[in-house]
Image (cartoon, coloured by chain):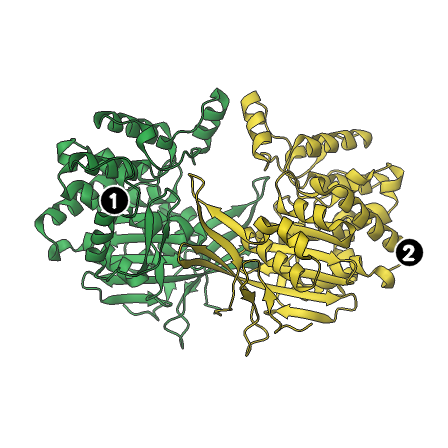
Chain colours: A green, B yellow
Amino acid sequence: MNDNAPIAASDGSVLRVHAGRPDAPIAVEVTRGGMVESVHRVIAAVVDASGKAVSTWGDVDRLVYGRSAIKPIQALPVLESGAAEAFKLDDAEVTLCCASHSGEPMHADRVVAWLDRLGLTAEDLECGPQIPIHEASAHAMIRSGAKPTRAHNNCSGKHSGMLTTAVHLGEPTKGYIGDDHPVQKRLKAVMAEMSGCDLSGVPTGYDGCGIPVYGVPLKGMATAMAQFADPAGQGAARQAAIKRIVASCAKHPLLIAGTDRFNSALLAETGTRCLLKSGAEGVFAGAATEKGLGICLKVDDGNGRAAQVAMGAILRHIGVLDADAQRRLANSLTTPVRNWAGRLVGVVRPSPELAF
Amino acid sequence: MNDNAPIAASDGSVLRVHAGRPDAPIAVEVTRGGMVESVHRVIAAVVDASGKAVSTWGDVDRLVYGRSAIKPIQALPVLESGAAEAFKLDDAEVTLCCASHSGEPMHADRVVAWLDRLGLTAEDLECGPQIPIHEASAHAMIRSGAKPTRAHNNCSGKHSGMLTTAVHLGEPTKGYIGDDHPVQKRLKAVMAEMSGCDLSGVPTGYDGCGIPVYGVPLKGMATAMAQFADPAGQGAARQAAIKRIVASCAKHPLLIAGTDRFNSALLAETGTRCLLKSGAEGVFAGAATEKGLGICLKVDDGNGRAAQVAMGAILRHIGVLDADAQRRLANSLTTPVRNWAGRLVGVVRPSPELAF
């Protein structure tokens, strides 16, 4: 496998790194009729658990906020701390720890029941309220006059996991999203360990759900994900946590995102062969367990339509999606663009040639 | 004025074309905490009515679909044909011909009343139905159980204008969005005349509302818009149409987009000094009437948040927005990024230096 090898795109054209520029980003193009209308640049790294690059596109040392794509990494302390065992978290709840869910009843109701076991309510979540991403759920809420709660926030499962750990370890639940709270310090330490990166002094910011985010080199983020694919170098507790997370997400693909979401369709297709998670601003991360590889990509401009198509192209490139899977996922790997009347007017696809 | 002159950005930093690369695109960056998280590349042209470039950024010969940014050009036949006079279109209706509206009652109700004067209904519009962009209007519709109609489609005013022309000229109303219908042939001819570009054989596609779109060089699109700023080279009927369109849109800024929309706020600020119109996939076009200049920009990746900020930067660059106007529009020129809890976590702003 090398970076200049052509990648078959679903329309028969090829996605390839520009011959003379092995560092060129992946291009995802949006066509309309006879012309490419818009184009996205994507940097990406596929690495093994030692951090060795197998394939890279663009500047993979660039600092990137992992956003929700690193939720599986952020779920580790819930399991390693013994909190999951103490509160008998089931596989659905472990999956919700890793989820950016659509706020459907299957997500929000489970979060509320779980918080109740902790002696807490949705008001203890410090993420803001969010109208469900799932349109029918949002419309039902609007029709009934109900207001979205914090349990409907797409990150409510991750936050419930943080609260579970805090309660289990006797830490204050109030202020758990603060930079100096033990919950957030643990998350930063876990990311440093998994990525092999020194995160002292890196740029920081705040996520959509209020927790701190850290700038991590894209390649480091892929290395962290590679530990999910090849955990041999990790301690026993972390290995067990990794195994549980991979198995749980494979069992509950609809809980990691939701109805009609690409991330859920992808996990339903790959099962335990992959752990895949999208994030805001065009980040997508994953582990290909049978290949022992970690993947992370970032769309320069932050667009999700391009992140999805680029992740599909990379999964094909590393041989995770066979011809049957590609056929079943065809509308996600090359996404149709339709107008208001439903007419097909273009597609989002990997570029047959890199223009950059 | 030259392309290498620094442009003061609202945060005191400067937007400048890279010294050694006068053809470099404008960069719009999205910050989060201490880091730029995402970045957009924008090509742009500011030209006079003869097509002479005053300022350019990037490859302005690139073919671009004008999308909804060229609606003022597409409104010309409604006036030039005598249809507007025959059916007594008022200034609000002329503005709706140019609008990508939010589907609020002030938009949809006016369209229905106008179609009634033609002996038509919303069902005669060949754009698909669209849930209002305006959240409160959409929620009211969902609560009442009503379904969005074609009158709520953001393009319903433009389509009503097309139908008005067809009825006036005795052309069939059915099929007016087809490539070979006289309505669409006229629109293509008008674009060729206004832009000075030969559009035979250019790539074509279909817009979100179903009408054909044509690939036009970005600079040609700016030249077409410059005719609105300096119509001296046009015939009498077109000059009158241009004058009416500029005056109408300045009078009804809320009708061209809607409540809390940047395009409306911008027009409310500039009045007849500008005619400005956003389009899908990151296109934004305008005319600075006092300067005699036309403007067109396209965000490579199609993102609207970048188009807005880039248009603001260009309007400052050419001296259309004075210090007071910049203060009033501050939150639109450098856009806050907030998380679900309402906390300010970043901004979308013109880049202080071009990284490309």
**Residue B142 drawn above or below residue B156:** above
With B232 as the anchor, is A74 left or right in this view?
Answer: left
The percent coordinates of residue B188 (x first, y second) are 74, 55
Secondary structure of the residue carrying tag 2 is helix
- Chain bearing mark 2: B
Disc sitting over residue B128 in the figure: none
Residue at image point 81% right, 42% down? B166
Distance (Cα) linking label 2 and label 1: 71 Å
Q: Is residue A234 left or right of residue B226?
A: left
Q: Are marks 2 and 1 on the same chain?
A: no
Is label 2 or label 1 in front? Answer: 1
The quadrant of the image that shows the N terminus of chain A is bottom left
Taking the image as drawn, is residue A170 in sight? Answer: yes
Left or right of A206 in this view: A271: left
Q: Residues within 10 Å of mark 2 (few under 14, many from 20)?
A: few
Q: Chain of mark 1?
A: A
Mark yes or no: residue A321 visible: no
Q: Amino acid at mark 1?
A: His
x then y, percent, for residue B244: 84, 48
**Which quadrant would residue A167 be assigned to in this image?**
top left
Closer to us: B54 or A341: B54
Element on which disc 1 rests: loop
How packed mark 1 is, by other alpha carbons closer than 10 Å (few <14, some 14-19, many 20 or more), is: some
Question: What residue is shown with label 1?
Answer: A181
- The picture quadrant where one finds residue B172 is top right
Looking at the picture, does residue A35 appear above or below residue A109? below
The residue labelled by disc 2 is B236
Could you tell whether B9 is left or right of B112 in the image? left
User: Which residue ends up furthest to the left in the rendered image?
Assistant: A236
Q: Position of residue A186 (x, y in %)?
A: 21, 48
